[in-house]
Image (tube, rainbow, N blue to C red):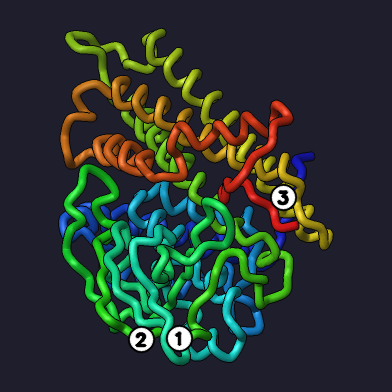
Amino acid sequence: MQATAKRTDSPADQYLERVRELLEPIRAAAPETEANRRLPAAIVESMQKAGVFAVAVPKSWGGLELDPVTHARGIELLTTADASAGWCAMIGCDTGYASAHLDDAAGRELFADPTAATVFVANPTGAAIPTDGGFTVTGRWTFASGSSHAKVFCFGCLVPTDSGPRMLGPGRPEIRVIAMPAEQAQVIDTWTTTGLRGSASHDVAVTNVFVPEERTFGFSDPMRRTGALYRLPNLFVFKIAAIPLGIARGALDDVLAIAATKRTLGSSISISEQQWLQTAIARAEFKYRQARSFYYEALRAVWETLESGEMPVQRQVVDLHLSMVGAMENCTEIVDSMYRAAGSASLYARHTLDRRFRDIHTAGQHTTFAPDRISDDGKVLLGLPVRNSPMISVPS
């Protein structure tokens, strides 16, 4: 007798089912998304209704407050349909993480719609000048993904003094994150790129805007919100690994679909009968599964530790960071091999493989995937001291 699959109706399962329902509309809208360099309003609305931007928002605010493994799985699914949608989901769901740094009343006032997307650019290319009751902020930030639809913008700033930026310690300038309603900032149309064209990752500028103290925070400040999801300040960074995993899965599926109908040139033999394609598919599949398994294993280990009420040890965070960088490196190889395997079909801009090829190479330029980032991981593995490494830092 065949066993019946056990159905679960957990909030995580319900959320992922809603995400799956978005995939076909997002896939169908991908040409429009690329052409207009932003997600269509209808897609943003459907993502918001599904809770995509509210996965990390606390339940007390009306959010989903789901675990980070579910966050990543949702982003990976969305990315199989269109990496720009997945990228906007990955950035936009920082609403719950950013607001965890603020006093509850101030957070509720600023994030009036907790289901809406947030822009978060931590790179401190702005100046926050202390003034009565807060800061006067001027700056310009690049890569403000989701700037076409986000309701709150969060930006990193240095705090200038007469002797230079305010410091937390030797070689550690204070990075003050300021949060403001989107209408207080100017979006500058700069996002004309190779890939992730629909992510609206334009520049954003502000000039002499007053930001109250209660709408600012530092990454070294204690978190204002309790709960496992908000205990590790840099946890939000690691969901980015879901992007290359989703692109690679989509590229594999593209080639499998092509192989079902494409014939060898001058022959009636299906390309699926060719050993070179069989080998390419097999290698791509095991690389994808290895990369995915390492990432989710490391992410679950960190989450289980946080759920237990403890803080992860540095080695756990190193494993998670290595799995993130490894996912990008391995998935880029997968997409490149699938692009070659599809032959001339990959060349046309209308084909999803062309878009996936461009998307993964654009995503791979993100600073979190820089090759030298893993040198600190190597130091930890070798038992050497590591200083000022925010990617793998763990609060004491």
Q: Position of residue 324 (x, y in %)?
A: 54, 40
- Mark 1 sits on what residue? 134
**Dot placed on the residue nearer the N-terminal end, 2 or 1:** 1
Q: Give whichever of discs 1 and 3 has the lower sequence position.
A: 1
Residue under label 2, please give it. Answer: 210
Residue 240 pos. (x, y %): 49, 49
Q: Quickly name the residue at label 3.
A: 302
Q: How far apart are marks 2 and 3 (CA)?
A: 38 Å
**Figure quadrant of residue 362:** top left
Type of amino acid under label 3? Val
In which image quadrant can residue 250 be found? top left
Q: Whole-Å distance between the Cαs marked 1 and 3?
A: 35 Å
In the image: residue 114, left or right of residue 332 = right
Residue extending furthest toward the front = 163
Label 3: which secondary element: helix
1 or 3: mark nearer the eye: 1
Give the quadrant of residue 247: top left
| Location of residue 284 with respect to 274 vertically, above or below | below
**What residue do we see at 35% from left, 34% from top?**
254
